[in-house]
Amino acid sequence: KAGVTQTPRYLIKTRGQQVTLSCSPISGHRSVSWYQQTPGQGLQFLFEYFSETQRNKGNFPGRFSGRQFSNSRSEMNVSTLELGDSALYLCASSLASRGNYNEQFFGPGTRLTVL
Amino acid sequence: KNQVEQSPQSLIILEGKNCTLQCNYTVSPFSNLRWYKQDTGRGPVSLTIMTFSENTKSNGRYTATLDADTKQSSLHITASQLSDSASYICVVSSPRGTLTFGKGTMLLVSP
């Protein structure tokens, strides 16, 4: 069974631009969560989608948004990029809601660099 | 405020030696605690998941313990190997699904 895939793996953007990241969950998984990981803050939860609906949201500004499609694939969009948005963005999928005992499986991440 | 504190921040050990990583949390109410291993440039991989009633769980050379009374967990690595070099992240979940992450312990196993 294929794992969680994320595209692109690496991305370089300049301040003010916008970016869209993509995540394909493991087949059969309906929950997709997004995280931002930086050396100083560690992993921080962005949001979770389940059956095309946003179920949970972290404390990030409105510039960060996402959506989920009927095939459970998810996209994350960041508008008006800032230098501080440089980070590894991780996507994780699970069978059901992330808060349950269901294990989350992480993708390899997208490394975003904002210049 | 829910917090997860991990110690040490970083650790260097010789190949073949054992080590123990610590995780203290203030998350309440508590549902489960997970340990993840994250290799450089990769996503985290789950090592163990423990609920309130579980005190110990093993996964090969990795053994996690949980003391829900003192809100402490540890991850013990036996007979370390070079491939154990990674970041180890402790994550605590509330019953509502809120996940609180520790900042991780960076382990370097030296030959």
Image: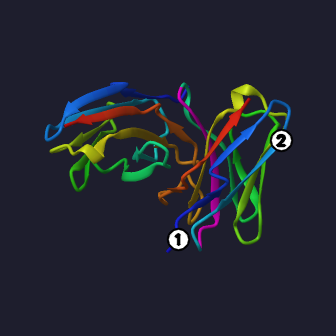
Residue tagged by mark 2? A18
B57 horizontally vs B100: left or right: left
The quadrant holding residue A30 is bottom right
Q: Which region shows up in magenta?
A: A28-39
Instruction: Read off the chain for label 1.
Output: A
| Residue A76 image position (x, y, % from top left) | 74, 50
Q: Is residue A25 above or below residue B2?
A: below
A30 horizontally vs B78: left or right: right
Q: Secondary structure at mark 2?
A: loop
B68 horizontally vs A15: left or right: left
Which numbered circle lies on residue A2? 1
Residue A24 in sight here: yes
The quadrant holding residue B18 is top left
Name the residue: 58% across, 48% down.
Answer: B96
| Residue B104 image position (x, y, % from top left) | 42, 33
CA distance separating discs 2 and 1: 29 Å
Does the CB distance between marks 2 and 1 fall below 8 Å? Answer: no
Residue placed most toward the observer, A39 or B64 = A39
Name the residue: 37% across, 25% down.
Answer: B9
Instruction: Read off the chain for label 2.
Output: A
A74 horizontally vs B38: left or right: right
Question: Which quarter of the image is occupied by the C terminus of chain A?
Answer: top right
The mark nearer the N terminus, 2 or 1, is 1
| Residue B66 forms part of the magenta stretch | no
Disc 2 with disc 1 on a shared chain: yes
| Residue A34 forms part of the magenta stretch | yes
Q: Secondary structure at mark 1?
A: loop
Name the residue: 73% across, 34% down.
Answer: A60
Q: Residue type at mark 2?
A: Gln
The local crowd at label 2, few if under 14, some if 14 to 19, many if 20 or more residues have their Cα within 10 Å, is some
Residue B71 in sight here: no
Q: Residue type at mark 1?
A: Ala
